[in-house]
Amino acid sequence: MNADATNADALALSRACSALWVATLSLMAAFMQTSAPAHRYLIARKIARNFETLREQDCFTTDSRATFSKLAQRWTAKADQLARQEDQPRGGIGFLQPIWKAR
């Protein structure tokens, strides 16, 4: 009975990890199709977190977990880069300043 429960837990973990992997691939596709920097930032953060979660799971091989770790670092760096871009003005109302100075 205990072995059956352990096998069932391992199977459930394996299925959950596979589902998270597929969801992460979907997020990566969404990232490539989204042009809004704020949305890309949020998606990149979520992808990085997903890779960190996948890296921690024992159902993957050591090589796969090392790859997930590298991918998490890359996506974190990408999100950090996008966060810096959000701080930079991109135009809009900032350009609508009068050409004269008020006294």
Image (tube, helix red, strand yellow):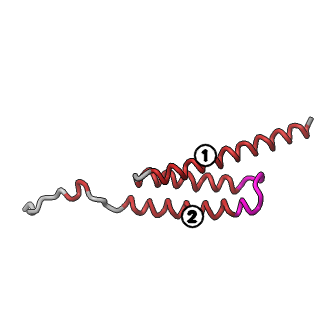
Q: Percent position (x, y) of residue 28? A: 55, 52
The residue identified by callout 1 is 23
- Asked if residue 9 lies in the magenta stretch, the reply is no
Picture residue at 91% right of the left edge, 38% below the top: 2
Bounds of the magenta span? Answer: 56-66
**39 vs 83, nearest the viewer:** 39
Which label lies toward us, 2 or 1?
1
The residue identified by callout 2 is 74
Which quarter shows the C terminus?
A: bottom left
Residue type marked 1:
Ala
Picture residue at 41% right of the left edge, 53% below the top: 35
Picture residue at 50% right of the left edge, 59% below the top: 79
Residue 7 falls in which quadrant of the image? top right
Q: Percent position (x, y) of residue 70? A: 63, 64
Q: Does residue 86 sit above or below 15 in this rendering? A: below
**95 vs 24, nearest the viewer:** 24
Picture residue at 26% right of the left edge, 58% below the top: 91
Residue type marked 2:
Arg
Report how far apart the C-alphas of labels 2 and 1 lie in the structure. Answer: 18 Å
In the structure shown, which secondary structural element does the residue marked by tag 2 occupy? Answer: helix
In the structure shown, which secondary structural element does the residue marked by tag 1 occupy? Answer: helix
Q: Percent position (x, y) of residue 15? A: 73, 42
Which quarter shows the N terminus?
A: top right
Numbered badge on residue 85 = none
**65 vs 89, nearest the viewer:** 65
Residue 25 is left or right of residue 95, and the answer is right
Residue 28 is left or right of residue 103, and the answer is right
Q: Does residue 38 sit above or below 102 in this rendering? A: above
Residue 8 falls in which quadrant of the image? top right
